[in-house]
Each structure stands twice: as structure tokens, then as C-alpha cells.
Amino acid sequence: MSTTEVEVTLRAAGVTKRFGAVVALSGVSMHLDRGEILGILGDNGAGKSTLMKILTGYMQPTTGTLVVRGKEMVIRSVDHARSLGIECVYQDLALVPGLSIYHNMFLNRESLRRIPPFMLDNRRMRQRAEAVLADIGVVVPSVEMESEQLSGGQRQAIAVARTVSSDASILLLDEPLAAMGARESALIVDLIMRLKAKGALSIAMIMHNYAQTLDIADRIILMQHGEITYENDSAKTSVAELMEIVRREYRTYYRGAA
């Protein structure tokens, strides 16, 4: 997908992140196009999560710039990122087990009644939650259910639905299929593809499984030791090619260490 043909919603240019003597990211430049799914691949320690935390305002880059919908930005915090339409779903999902689905979907964004007493407007939140879930095709027995009663796939779907209900335009997913069986993975893949079909979201997702990523993503980047070492359209990439890049890097690394 060419950046000359579509609007770039999010761009990182020359981003570096240092923790003392440790360089977690080294001159990373990447972009996320409007309406696309970008797969971010790499082993543990490659810098994927650090990049995600910078894009969501959780931490600041040491050097480099971020551009959101054509404007250079200093993303000061997670709340600031959200105000720019950037939401992230981490592996822990940040759902409160004892709260209902609809309360979780509006956590820290609760609707209040407009007349005294200014109590929670549970009816409004229930209706909004039901509408959002129906719109993106997530089926649950009732939005009154507590999140701890849901399967892993359902909890992931609710966490994603929460970002949709906040009118996010850029969605970052941290290992959305981690520790899921085939059936639950299929549920989340279907949800991601439905969101893509609507064209309203740009999605970047950290993944480990090469085959799953190539099936879902429009484009992929491979990160190794804090750098992007490969980028291409998924249709022009194979699992064998990615595996060879990783094997070649490890052979070079261990030969140098020896």
C-alpha cells in the first residue's frame, strides 16, 4: 500500500529510545496508512513493545518525531494519545473482573445523568454498549455479564469494542491472539477484519506468529535488536522468507559473539 495513494494516519521518523546504556530503539521509521492493518513482527526484546508505548504516549522517545494525521506531535501521555484518537489494547486487556461488560466498556469514561443527582447513567451506557457490540458483530449473552464470566476471546473482543466506543481512529493491538485456541483466535481475526472492512480504523498489531500475521495484515515490518530490518506488503512476503531473515541474523549475531 503506497503512502502516495493513501493518507498516512501515523508516522514515526528516526525514533530512538535509550535506557541508560541500553538502546531499545535505534532510528526506527515506520508509518500506518488509513484503513490498513500493519503487522509488527519480532522476537522478545526486538523493541516492538517500546515502540508501541511511544506511539501511545506511555513513554517519550529519546530522539525522533511522531506525526499524527499530517501534524508533528509530542504525545505527552496516554490521555493525550486518546484525545488524538490513538488507543491501545494490551495483553492484560485492563478489564475489571467484577464489573459488567458495559461498565468495562465505559471505564473512566462513565456517562452521568444530566440532571441532579449526577449519578451513573447506566441505561445510556448499556444501550451504547449494545449498539457498539452489534455494529462490530460481537455477540455476548448480555452486557450485564461480568467480564470474568467471558472466554479469553470474548474478553479480547470487549477490550477492542471499548476502543471503538471511544471513537478511536488508530488502534494498536499488543499480541491480540496470544494464548488463544483456534476457535477464539478465529473470533478475534473475524473482528479485526470486520473493523478493517468498515474503513474507519487504522490498525497496527504486535504479533509473533508469522503465518497468522501474513493472513491478516496488509503490510508487515520485522524488528530485530531495536531496528526495522524488513518491510513489505504481506502478499509479497512468505513465512520462509521471514524465517530465513531471522536465521541469518542469529547466525551473524552468534558468530560475532563467539
Image (spheres, grey):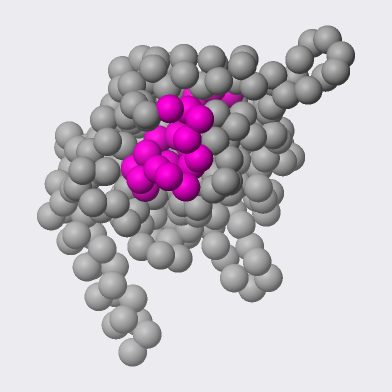
Q: Position of residue 1 (x, y in %)?
A: 31, 25
* 193 to the left or right of 167: left
Residue shown at the point (69%, 19%) measured from the top left: 121
215 w.r.t. 134: above or below: below
Is any part of residue 81 visible from this angle?
no
Q: Position of residue 150 (x, y in %)?
A: 40, 43
Residue range corresponding to the magenta coloring: 142-170
Tell me the quarter of the picture where residue 108 sits.
top right
Residue shown at the point (83%, 19%) measured from the top left: 118
Q: Position of residue 72 (x, y in %)?
A: 66, 29
Q: Position of residue 98 (x, y in %)?
A: 57, 46
Tell me the quarter of the picture where residue 7 sits.
top left
Residue 104 in magenta?
Answer: no
Query: In this view, which residue lies farthest toward the bottom?
Result: 258
Residue shown at the point (33%, 21%) measured from the top left: 137
* 255 to the left or right of 95: left
* 184 to the left or right of 25: left
In this orientation, which residue lies closer to the viewer: 92 or 170? 92
Residue 145 in magenta?
Answer: yes
